[in-house]
Image: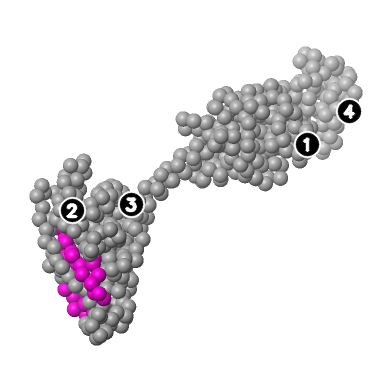
Amino acid sequence: MLAVDAAGAVTRLNDAARSLLGVVPGGVLDGRAPGWLAKAHHALADTPAPDRAESGRSLPEPIAHGSVGDRFFAAHAVPDGGPAGVIPGHSAGTIWWLFDVTENRRLARELAAERERTSFLADASSQLLASLNLERCMEVTVRLAARHLADAALVIAPGSGRSHPVSYCGPDGEVEHQELLVDPEEVPGLAEAMQGFPPVPSRWIDPAAAPAWVAREHLGELAAMVVTALPGHGIPAGALMLLRRGGRGAFSESEEMVARLFAARAGAAMSAARVYAEQASITDTLMRELLPPRTIDLPEAELAARYRPSGDGERVGGDFYDLHPAADDAGAAPESLVVLGDVCGKGLEAAVLTGKIRNTLRALVPLTKDHQRVLELLNGTLLHSDSTRFVTLVLASLHQEGGRVRLRLTSAGHAAPLIVRAGGEVESADTRGSLIGVLEEITSKTATVLLEPGDTCLLYTDGITEAVGGPLGDEMFGDERLHEELRGCGGMPPEALVERVHMLAAEWVGAGVHDDMAVIAIAAPRRNHLSAVGGQGPGRYTA
């Protein structure tokens, strides 16, 4: 504390002020006290008295800050104790209280820096977790690193052999993705970082030794370089390199610590993206095997098929169909096979069993001359599996006879196929049989149907007839309504017929919940055909 009169003379001071400032009573501030304090006193002395009114007992806010030696002080000013003449030789002035705030300032700077680091890391985590695309994660990593941690940054991801994906971002903020031949041994610390070892301190790395693919020409001379691992899930996700150009200092320990914290977040995001990409690839491969096949042009007939899983976000379910064209060496009367089935349940678990059934039936195609035998073998396979689900299905073997198509239809616990004649008549095939995967012994009855030009055989799952909706939302579509609608579809091409059936079921359900739906339409070829007897036989027709 020191008291200074209006002219700037020190009237009294305590020992701490004497030791700090080196002034004595009677001395003046100018030339002896720090310039910032003298300047603040003169500015205060020139202020009108009403504006300097004392505010209560507590000290007012500091009106000046400055350093004395290597310490930093805040100066508070209060009016000196009374009018001139109360104390002999004393004129009214100001009492200055100086508080050493060096440590406070250091702590404040550290707190601000910590808040900035926390904000940066939180923002980085948010941006990195916004995508499960590996290239996008690498792009975000180098852009954030170049903007907040260094002048330029590179991310090197694990590759194949010496070829590695590399993302680079320079001072302009533009990101480059490249596939480079990289020898980690060329860069100090990179080989260790790629294996997940702790980073080498940047002061041990000579940036002048960096190869050209790291020290890009437009960066000029490098002043410092940080190489740190990108930790992953089980295996490293790659390495992060930070580059600082000449004219700037080396990386401090706190900056390297922030780089490691950032690298941990980036590595976790990249590792998650890589795992997701691998799982997505595996899922896509398996899904392709589970998806219904694209419609195949069979030589015996025209065919159309449609499939709609129960969930809008699903691609597979419990309903399925398969097409097996006749083999060239299948004998004098080769037959193609069409299968439509419905596994108990829906979703992925049902789809997995669907894949097993389809693979089994594919292996049994050479035996399809005997539908009963095929169903018995499939039934035995399901009974000896871990699944408790069952399946209903229809087997349809196709054989062309002139312009007509002969069908052998066998139902195994499934709705019998419907025959839509060209004139609009609707018939139910006389076939029935046991569920597959429930009983040790099964029975079945095969129906033979002849399709004339314009006739269509419709195979469908119960997702069509059991669709619940209608005007009140609680009525089943039902077999009778399906029959009635099909009476107006005589002579309709297979493609149009399956679209019509699907549309009817979808309109009936509306926005309600529905089961998987699958429909197949098989029709005799719609092309001109002349019989062998003068071209006037029953096989002659025009599409």
Structural distance between the alpha carbons of marks 3 and 4: 96 Å
Whole-percent x, y for residue 346 in the image: 27, 52
Give the mark nearest the N terminus, 4 or 1: 4
Q: What residue type is disc 1 on?
A: Gly
Is 307 situated above or below 56?
A: below
Do residues under tags 4 and 1 come within 8 Å of each other at their CB atoms?
no
Do residues under tags 2 and 3 come within 8 Å of each other at their CB atoms?
no
Q: Residues within 10 Å of mark 4 (few under 14, many from 20)?
A: some
Structural distance between the alpha carbons of marks 2 and 4: 116 Å
Q: Which residue is mark 2?
A: 374
Q: Which residue is mark 1?
A: 220
Which label belongs to residue 290? Answer: 3
* Main secondary structure found in the magenta portion: strand
| Secondary structure category for the residue under label 3 | helix
Which residue is drawn at the image coordinates 45% and 42% (left, top)? 278
Looking at the rendering, which quadrant does residue 217 occupy?
Answer: top right
Which residue is drawn at the image coordinates 59% and 32% (left, top)? 239
Which residue is drawn at the image coordinates 29% and 70% (left, top)? 301
Q: Which is more foreground, mark 1 or mark 3?
A: 3
